[in-house]
Image: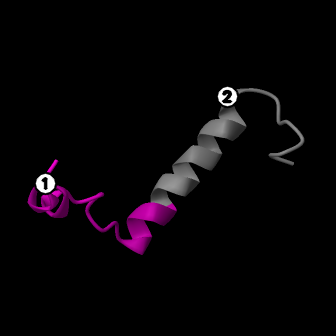
Amino acid sequence: MSSASTSEVKASPAVAAEDRLRADLYNFIGLLLAGPPDQMLL
């Protein structure tokens, strides 16, 4: 691969803090509703 092609690849678009928080909240709620809580969740 040439250095030109690797510099054009972007890891991911910037995610707003509010969107990250929403995703984390939905993940947490999903864990709560999926089954009984484990030690990590408690």
Disc 1 or disc 2, which is closer to the eye? 1
**Which amino acid, mark 2?**
Ala
- Using the image, determine if residue 32 lies above or below residue 5: above
The quarter of the displayed image where residue 20 is located: bottom left
Q: How is the image coloured?
A: one colour
Residue 35 located left or right of residue 4 = right
- Using the image, determine if residue 13 lies above or below residue 30: below
The quarter of the displayed image where residue 12 is located: bottom left
Which mark is drawn over residue 25? none
Q: Which residue is mark 2?
A: 34
Q: Residues within 10 Å of mark 2 (few under 14, many from 20)?
A: few
Q: Secondary structure under badge 2?
A: helix
Q: Nearer the viewer, residue 14 or 16?
A: 14
Q: Which residue is mark 1?
A: 2
Q: Position of residue 6 (x, y in %)?
A: 19, 57
- The magenta segment is 1-21
Q: Position of residue 34 (x, y in %)?
A: 67, 28
**Which amino acid, mark 1?**
Ser
Residue 30 within the segment the image draws in magenta: no
Q: Secondary structure under badge 1?
A: loop
The mark total stands at: 2
Q: Residue furthest top?
A: 35
